Image (cartoon, rainbow, N blue to C red):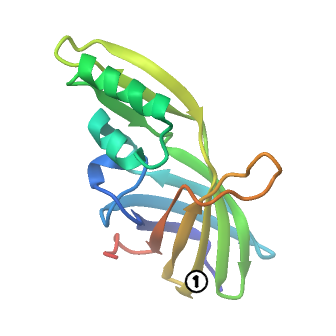
Amino acid sequence: MNIDGRWEGVYVHAKGPKAYHPFTIGGDQYAISAELRVQGGRVTGTMTDEERVFEVTLPQMMERDRDTMSPNTAHGYAEFSAAHPEALLTIEYPAQSDLSGRLEGDRLTFVKEYRGTLQQTFNLGRDKRTQPVQTVSMSTVHYSGVVINEALIEGTWVIRKTGPLGRWLPPTDSGQFRLRRNPVPDL
């Protein structure tokens, strides 16, 4: 099966509101494009995330992470939010990523590794002061899909990290993707 070439598509997060992209999204589609090459079953290529800057308020962050926050972290968020009620966290992903994986029959698996780091900055409200928060190494995204035909690939993606003993931790995010050789499809 020939999947060499340019693909356009979308990804969707499994849950959450669109404004809270860096953590989870609920059904909103985000455009991606990929350039794929296959040689001897080995897949290489690049992917571009078309939307890569997202904003979130502290109450949105607290709502999303409430069950996993330590009491100290929750207290810190609450104090910061009270001192800066208009604070907005802007998160910017790298645009480009590298792909590597395998094509076995109609099964396509690959990992996506972002080029660069995630940038996070707080806008502290009316005075428009910005404060860099942190630069974070990006997680690897694991894709698994089926090549429906030479014009359509569909599947799922998951972000997983390894724990201290090298074992997989539970996924931190997941969703679906679709790639076509033609205009971007709806999921």
Query: x, y (%) of residue 71?
Result: 47, 34
Q: Is residue 73 above or below residue 154?
A: above
Q: Residue furthest front?
A: 71
Query: x, y (%) of residue 66?
Result: 40, 45
Displayed quadrant of residue 54: top left
Q: Does residue 152 appear left or right of residue 109 in this picture? A: left
Q: Residue at x 57, y 63 (%)?
A: 158
Q: Does residue 24 appear left or right of residue 135 in this picture? A: left
Q: Residue at x 31, y 33 (%)?
A: 58
Which residue is tagged 1? 146
Query: x, y (%) of residue 41?
Result: 77, 76
Secondary structure type for disc 1: strand
Question: Can you see residue 154?
Answer: yes
Q: Does residue 157 appear left or right of residue 126 in this picture? A: right
Q: Residue at x 42, y 36 (%)?
A: 92
Query: x, y (%) of residue 173?
Result: 51, 58
Task: Say what amino acid the circle numbered 1 marks.
Answer: Val
Q: Residues within 10 Å of mark 1 (few under 14, many from 20)?
A: some
* Of 64 and 20, the residue lying toward us: 64
